[in-house]
């Protein structure tokens, strides 16, 4: 029992140190850019020598790998929560899904670049780190299929459409809403192209005769 307790404490300390390293890596990525983080600066931030950091991550790509897995797992949990109860109308449902991904992506440039762009030369996520991204992709395909969009080419257009607006927003109006405001219009164009029925029109309430305007 004592040995087991000691091993647990060691594991907890290692997990806490690993968490501190990743937090420092994210902070540095947001300051200098995701492709420009250095193990030396991360080690200095957490108060350790670079050789000590290597006992937790054996390379910078290993840090990226953990960050990549963490980012996609975070989005997976976020999307499952936000899309747990979508509107019944297919067009309204895909509007919700598109907005959830758009807002998550534009909230953090460094995270978006790591998740969705090849900005780091030589980095490829491991199969383990890639698994949350694959689950999100599979869920997205199934989600659109549940709304009547079953062609893979249509799904590819969907992710290109949303991704393109995200990239334009981050590149040309970071922190603003220039391309965010176009998202609903773009999704409606997609919905029209795949033959989704329009949303029901809202009719104004009729006044009773003699009621003053």
Image (cartoon, rainbow, N blue to C red):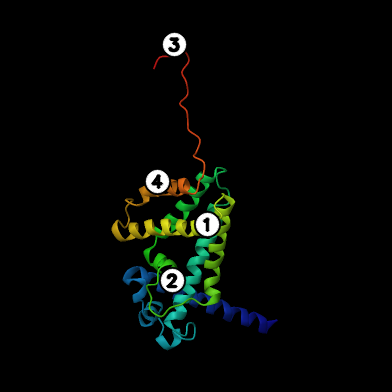
Q: Residue visible at 36% across and 83% down?
A: 40
**Mark 3 — residue?**
210
Q: Residue furthest top?
A: 210
Q: Quadrant of residue 157?
A: bottom left
Which is nearer the N-term, disc 4 or disc 2?
A: 2
Alpha-carbon span between mark 1 and mark 2 = 22 Å
Which is nearer the N-term, disc 1 or disc 4?
A: 1
**Mark 2 — residue?**
23
Give the crowd class for mark 1: few <14, some 14-19, many >=20 residues within 10 Å: some
Position of the C terminus by quadrant: top left
Which is nearer the N-term, disc 4 or disc 3?
A: 4
Dots 4, 3 in contact, CB < 8 A: no
Alpha-carbon span between mark 4 and mark 2 = 37 Å
Q: Is residue 189 left or right of residue 152?
A: left
Position of residue 105 measured from the top left corner of the image (x, y, whole percent) = 42, 60
Alpha-carbon span between mark 1 and mark 4 = 22 Å
Label 2: which secondary element: helix
Q: Residue visible at 40% across and 14% down?
A: 212
Position of residue 132 measured from the top left corner of the image (x, y, whole percent) = 54, 67
Which is nearer the N-term, disc 1 or disc 2?
A: 2
**Mark 4 — residue?**
185
Alpha-carbon span between mark 1 and mark 3 = 50 Å
Alpha-carbon span between mark 4 and mark 3 = 39 Å
Position of residue 200 measured from the top left corner of the image (x, y, whole percent) = 51, 35
Examine the rendered structure and indicate whether residue 129 appears above or below residue 57.
above
Q: Which mark is residue 79?
A: 1
Give the crowd class for mark 4: few <14, some 14-19, many >=20 residues within 10 Å: few
Q: In front: 89, or 20?
A: 89
Label 1: which secondary element: helix
């Amino acid at each position: 029992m004592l040995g087991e307790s000691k091993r647990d404490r060691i594991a907890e300390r290692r997990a806490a140190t690993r968490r501190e390293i990743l937090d420092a890596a994210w902070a540095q990525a947001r300051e200098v850019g995701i492709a420009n983080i250095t193990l030396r600066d991360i080690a200095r931030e957490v108060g350790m020598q670079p050789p000590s950091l290597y006992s937790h991550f054996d390379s910078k790509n290993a840090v990226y790998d953990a960050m990549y897995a963490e980012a996609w797992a975070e989005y997976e949990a976020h999307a499952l929560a936000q899309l747990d109860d979508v509107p019944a109308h297919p067009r309204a449902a895909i509007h919700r899904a598109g907005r959830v991904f758009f807002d998550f992506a534009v909230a953090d440039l460094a995270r978006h670049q790591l998740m969705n762009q090849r900005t780091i030369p030589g980095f490829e996520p491991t199969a383990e780190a890639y698994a949350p991204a694959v689950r999100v992709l599979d869920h997205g395909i199934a989600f659109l299929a549940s709304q009547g969009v079953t062609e893979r080419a249509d799904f590819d257009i969907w992710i290109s459409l949303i991704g393109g607006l995200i990239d334009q927003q981050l590149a040309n109006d970071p922190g603003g809403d220039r391309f965010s405001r176009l998202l609903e219009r773009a999704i409606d164009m997609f919905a029209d192209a795949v033959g989704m029925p329009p949303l029901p029109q809202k009719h104004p309430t009729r006044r009773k005769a003699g009621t003053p305007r």
